[in-house]
Image (spheres, helix red, strand yellow):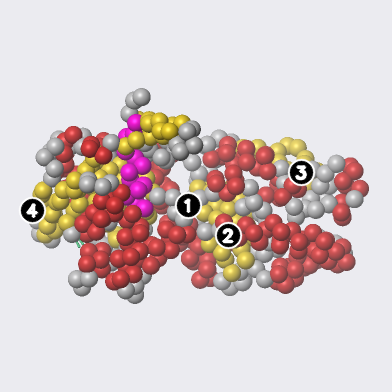
């Protein structure tokens, strides 16, 4: 039983990873304004190659029998869509290959040939009433938006669209609405709202919501791009819990007590995540039901922590809680505007060269402190590949500096920042972490 890398993230080669597009899902009820949202996003993401796919292209063509009773056909049910085909097209584009998109004709309700050939692009926007319904499709999306429009507004849009623009008669439109559209929304579409990263309360002039969405997408795209570039950078999978905690500790008005509480919770998650990158050995145990469980075992003797004083010390408790009795060394780096960073204190385990090192510092800004700390560890004989740098937030500039200089160390972070301001402070950041955590402001 050999020792293996316990990397929990999917291993994707950087070549494959480099071609992966950024996928935005836009869901919402019929006539909710999805197309307008897609248009605005497309306009604002200038400079990117963007393709917009509509779930409607993936409607199953109707047989003659179904066509003869087309008014009885439920176009608002998940089974109306060829989800298998949609999944294969998205997978193909995600892997950097061309995809063949069906050509659904709304007049004849048939798929007509030829299919539309779509080339891989930087961004794919997939819009449709039920694009969040299938978990496999949701899983492929980098950002999920739900356009939340009041039912009466949606109905009014739909009546206008179907009568004025499509020439249908009002009685049929209303019948279809009460029989299929409304129940379809309640049964299948509204329940997918919970999967959205952002719920857009829609109105024609909702500029604030749009600005926020575009900023969020740009941030996520920045993260996506930098992750594509550096295969040794691991950004924790974002959940509402994690974003909620980050929202609290980024908020300038959060009390010291809450700051410490939520920073500790997040730090614990980052530490657990970092531990997932350590080597492990397979281990079999017998369970109380006398069954055999084939698990894994980590070797604690070959591990230590090193905190960068002072903010890094806030991460020590979490590491101790996860690894009882772990040795933790310390490094103090003094920042001097004139002379740059200087190492002024170090206390490290004597046998550090034989250990895997979890380097602790909650903020990666310019990367200067991290470079000082890492170069000391290398001087002490720690192999570069044995260093895992754990932090809460990382600026792209710091990531660039560390990853370029030390391509074999791993960085585990909860979120990537927009950048640095003129004072080299992380933006949006969370202020001076040490001051807020230790209450020294
Ligand atoms: O990537 P860099 O540009 O080097 O900046 C990151 C450093 O800045 C912060 O420490 P700070 O100087 O605020 O000291 P403190 O931890 O003592 O508060 C942080 O904890 C890092 O150590």
Image quadrant in which you'd find residue 120: top right
Binning the other alpha carbons within 10 Å of mark 4 as few (below 14), some (14 to 19) or many (20 upward) gives few
Q: In the image, which is nearer the foreground, mark 2 or mark 4? A: 2
Q: CA distance from mark 1 to mark 2?
A: 31 Å
Residue 133 located left or right of residue 343: right
**Residue to which mark 2 is pinned:** 194
Q: Residue at x 61, y 71 (%)?
A: 203
- Residue 417 visible in the displayed image: no
- Residue 150 visible in the displayed image: yes
**Residue to which mark 4 is pinned:** 344
Q: In the image, which is nearer the foreground, mark 2 or mark 3? A: 2
Residues at badges 4 and 1 in contact (C-beta under 8 Å)? no
Binning the other alpha carbons within 10 Å of mark 2 as few (below 14), some (14 to 19) or many (20 upward) gives few
Q: Nearer the viewer, residue 148 or 210?
A: 148
Residue 274, x across and y down, in percent: 33, 45
Q: Residue at x 20, y 73 (%)?
A: 441
Residues at badges 3 and 1 in contact (C-beta under 8 Å)? no
Element carrying mark 1: loop
Element carrying mark 4: strand
Label at residue 47? 1
Under 8 Å from ligand 1: the CB of mark 3?
no
């Amino acid at each position: 039983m050999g020792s293996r890398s316990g990397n929990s993230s999917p291993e994707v080669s950087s070549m494959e990873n480099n071609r992966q597009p950024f996928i935005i899902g836009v869901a919402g009820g019929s006539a909710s304004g999805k197309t307008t949202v897609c248009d605005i996003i497309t306009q604002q993401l200038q400079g990117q190659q963007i393709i917009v796919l509509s779930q409607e292209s993936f409607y199953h063509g109707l047989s003659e029998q179904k066509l003869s009773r087309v008014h009885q056909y439920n176009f608002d049910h998940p089974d109306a869509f060829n989800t298998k085909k949609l999944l294969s097209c998205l997978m193909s584009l995600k892997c950097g290959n061309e995809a063949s998109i069906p050509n659904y004709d709304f007049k004849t309700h048939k798929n007509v040939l030829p299919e539309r050939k779509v080339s891989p692009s930087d961004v794919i926007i997939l819009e449709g009433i039920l694009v969040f319904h299938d978990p496999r499709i949701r899983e492929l999306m980098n950002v999920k938006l739900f356009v939340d429009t009041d039912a009466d507004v949606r109905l009014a849009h739909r009546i206008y669209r179907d009568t004025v623009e499509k020439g249908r008669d009002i009685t049929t439109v209303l019948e279809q609405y009460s029989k299929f559209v409304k129940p379809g929304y309640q049964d299948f579409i509204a329940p997918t709202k919970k999967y959205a990263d952002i719920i857009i309360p829609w109105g024609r002039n909702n500029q604030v919501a749009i600005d926020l969405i575009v900023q969020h997408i740009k941030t996520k795209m920045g993260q996506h791009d930098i992750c594509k570039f550096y295969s040794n950078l691991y950004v924790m999978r974002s959940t509402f819990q994690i974003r909620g905690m980050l929202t609290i500790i980024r908020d300038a008005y959060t009390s010291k007590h809450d700051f410490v509480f939520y920073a500790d919770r997040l730090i614990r998650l980052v530490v657990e995540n970092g531990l997932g990158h350590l080597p492990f050995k397979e281990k079999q145990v017998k369970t109380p039901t006398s069954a055999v469980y084939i698990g894994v075992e980590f070797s604690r003797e070959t591990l230590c922590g090193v905190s960068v004083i002072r903010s890094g010390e806030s991460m020590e408790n979490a590491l101790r809680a996860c690894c009882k009795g772990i040795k933790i060394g310390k490094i103090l780096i003094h920042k001097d505007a004139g002379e740059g960073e200087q190492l002024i204190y170090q206390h490290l385990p004597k046998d550090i060269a034989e250990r895997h090192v979890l380097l602790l510092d909650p903020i990666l800004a310019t990367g200067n402190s991290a470079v000082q700390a890492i170069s000391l560890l290398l001087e002490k004989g720690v192999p570069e590949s044995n260093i895992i740098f754990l932090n809460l937030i990382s600026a792209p500039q710091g990531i660039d500096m560390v990853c370029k200089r030390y391509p074999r160390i791993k960085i585990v972070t909860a979120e990537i920042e927009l950048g640095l301001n003129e004072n080299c402070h992380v933006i949006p950041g969370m202020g001076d972490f040490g001051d807020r955590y230790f209450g020294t402001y």
